[in-house]
Image (cartoon, rainbow, N blue to C red):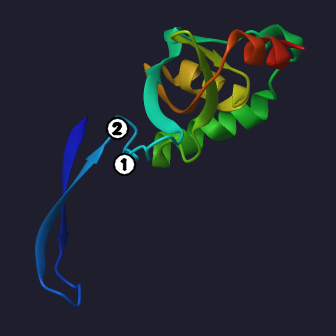
Amino acid sequence: MANLPLNFSHAPIKISSLTIKASSNGVPFSKPKSGGLVILDIPLDKIRRPLMRTRANDPQKVKDLMDSISQIGLQEPIDVLEVEGVYYGFSGCHRFEAHQRLGLPTIRCKIRRGTKETLRHHMR
């Protein structure tokens, strides 16, 4: 995690500097609300992709995402289901592959907790 100083010399209120905590891709961390979903950076190798072989990703879309992520970071986290401490990714296939191909160790995820029954429902 990096601390990035920002200077606002042209602001109407005189502020000399402000520090924002951000992840490795430069996007500020979200603070989870009580009982709400959690947004975290998770290592790619900790996310299981059970439906990965059901379809191929569009290579041009992956390339475009790689360019965008390289320039401005990931703008929309992928959705991940956590079941008994294991993360399962069912959406964000192109974003996930773009992170893999860029060699990034983590990806920003919206994490929802679920049960084994919830997991079985997603696997259908």
Q: In this view, does 101 lie above or below 35?
A: above
Dot 2 and dot 1 residues touching (CB under 8 Å): yes
Query: Residue visible at 55% across and 47% down?
Result: 75
The answer to whether residue 60 is left or right of residue 27 is right
Residue 109 can be seen, yes or no = yes
Question: Residue 33 at what x, y percent from top left?
Answer: 44, 47
The answer to whether residue 95 is left or right of residue 103 is right
Label 2: element kind:
loop
Image quarter hosting the C terminus: top right
Q: Which amino acid does label 2 sit on?
A: Ser
Question: Residue 117 at what x, y percent from top left?
Answer: 77, 13
**Residue 63: quadrant of the picture:** top right
Using the image as rendered, state which of residue 51 and residue 35 is in the foreground.
Answer: 35
Query: Residue visible at 37% across and 46% down?
Result: 31
Mark linked to residue 28: 1
**Residue 120: quadrant of the picture:** top right
Q: What residue type is labelled 1?
A: Pro
Instruction: Return the residue at label 2.
Output: 23
Question: Residue 5 at what x, y percent from top left?
Answer: 17, 57
Residue count near mark 2 (Cα–Cα under 10 Å), binned few <14, some 14–19, many ≥20: some
Q: Label 2 vs label 1: CA separation?
A: 6 Å
Looking at marks 2 and 1 on the same chain, the residue that comes earlier in the sequence is marked by: 2
